């Protein structure tokens, strides 16, 4: 059974421009579903339409099989965590958590019981008598979560709740949120512009751009088989390398010195316009199997991996991501290789025409292409 079903949803504020257009998706019960896309793509607007905070211009919304298009927010049996947490500064943590229960006119004993359970679950018990100004950003975020949990609603909507936290705390809270969702078994719809959050947290994710669905699927399916150039470059860190190309003698020609053989099962007469390659699919090569030489213009050694930026022509640069730590200098020319079955090919409109044959949860090994003394 689907917890949320959006059917032909359209949102327009002026009757002319559609900020959300023709959205059709089913969110399953107990699923962690992520809406991801750049700023202004319509993801928060869609979340607010599900919550009842925005009217739906056209289309229908179903919650747990019941039509909810015209229901008021409090009639939809869901909770919401906002980006700015929306805590009452003059109330204690305990009163912030139980405020929604007070409005539901639950008994004080039931309010106390639910508050204590949520506080224990989220590590807030020592802070129940403090006010929000005395809490850290992560603690305030937990209070907002606790307020949503105590309502015991089967659906929780979250609008970029981690965007105000620093990078280290955001990573920690990603894990805690995901574990909490599994523990409670609730349906969670999570909005973010951070593709790393989407990849690490989602059971399924929807990629939006200009109010339109670009792709819906499991994170690794979308990463390995993107529908178009936008999805390919938006999902992944670093983003997929893309360049204009032409086909000559069953070979992709990127520049005067970079050519990549087409896979055998690709039609060389098709109208390919661009090639895409993931950074991890560009490897250091031995002298016998290299495809081209890349002149290094930047090196980033991150500890567990090394990012090499190299020029493919006078205007464009690509990234290669290598496992481990490599002592490669700027200006050095290194042999590089790309296996033809790892490439993606797009038409002039950016639609995918050929995809990498990588499978989800596959493994690969970087070739030991440079002499051992090059390793740090």
Image (cartoon, rainbow, N blue to C red):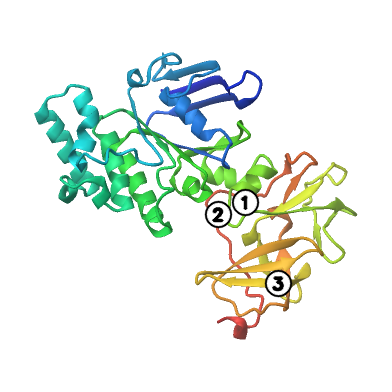
Instruction: Please give the name of the residue rendered at 41% of the width and 41% of the height, measured from the top-left corner.
Output: 83
Q: Decide: marks 2, 1 in contact (CB < 8 A)?
A: yes
Q: Which residue is mark 1?
A: 358
Q: Image quadrant for the C terminus?
A: bottom right
Image height of 254 relative to 204, above or below: below
- Mark sitting earlier along the chain (2/3): 3
> Quarter of the image containing the N terminus?
top left
Q: Say what secondary structure mark 2 lies in.
A: loop
User: Does 130 sit above or below residue 76?
Assistant: below
Query: In x, y percent, where is residue 195?
Result: 53, 48
**Separation of residues labelled 3 and 1 (CA atoms):** 29 Å
Closest to the observer: 183 or 158? 158
Residue underneath mark 3: 297
Q: Observer-nearest residue: 48 or 224? A: 48
Q: How far apart, in angstroms, are the residues tagged by discs 2 and 1? A: 7 Å
* Disc 2 from disc 3: Cα separation: 30 Å
């Amino acid at each position: 059974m689907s917890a949320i079903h959006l059917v032909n949803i359209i949102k327009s504020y002026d009757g002319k421009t559609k900020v959300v257009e023709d959205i059709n998706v089913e969110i399953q019960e107990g699923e962690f579903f992520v809406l991801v896309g750049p700023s202004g793509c319509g993801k928060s607007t869609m979340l607010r339409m599900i919550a009842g905070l925005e009217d739906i211009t056209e289309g229908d919304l179903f919650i747990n099989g019941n039509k909810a298009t015209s229901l008021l927010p409090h009639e939809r049996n869901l909770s919401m965590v906002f980006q700015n947490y929306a805590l009452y500064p003059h109330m204690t943590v305990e009163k912030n958590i139980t405020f929604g229960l007070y409005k539901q006119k639950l008994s004080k004993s039931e309010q106390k019981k639910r508050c204590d359970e949520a506080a224990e679950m989220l590590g807030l018990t020592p802070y129940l008598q403090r006010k929000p100004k005395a809490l850290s950003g992560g603690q305030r975020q937990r209070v907002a979560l606790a307020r949503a949990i105590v309502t015991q609603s089967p659906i929780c909507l979250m609008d970029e709740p981690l965007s105000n936290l620093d990078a280290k705390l955001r990573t920690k809270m990603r894990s805690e949120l995901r574990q909490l969702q599994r523990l409670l078994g609730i349906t969670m719809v999570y909005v973010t512009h951070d593709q790393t959050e989407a990849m690490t947290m989602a059971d399924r994710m929807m990629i939006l751009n200009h109010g339109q669905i670009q792709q819906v699927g499991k994170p690794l399916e979308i990463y390995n088989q993107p529908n178009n150039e936008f999805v390919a470059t938006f999902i992944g860190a670093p983003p997929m390398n893309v360049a204009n190309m032409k086909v000559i003698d069953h070979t992709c020609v990127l520049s005067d010195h970079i050519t990549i053989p087409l896979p055998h099962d690709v039609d060389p007469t098709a109208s390919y316009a661009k090639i895409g390659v993931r950074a991890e699919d560009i490897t250091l090569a031995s002298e016998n199997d290299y495809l081209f030489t890349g002149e290094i213009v930047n090196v980033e050694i991150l500890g567990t991996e090394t990012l090499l930026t190299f020029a493919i022509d006078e205007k464009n640069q690509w990234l290669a991501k290598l496992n481990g730590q490599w002592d490669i200098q700027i200006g050095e020319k290194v042999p590089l290789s790309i296996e033809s079955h790892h490439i993606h090919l797009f038409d002039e409109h950016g639609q995918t025409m050929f995809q990498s044959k990588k499978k989800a949860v596959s493994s690969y090994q970087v070739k030991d292409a440079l002499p051992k003394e090059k390793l740090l």
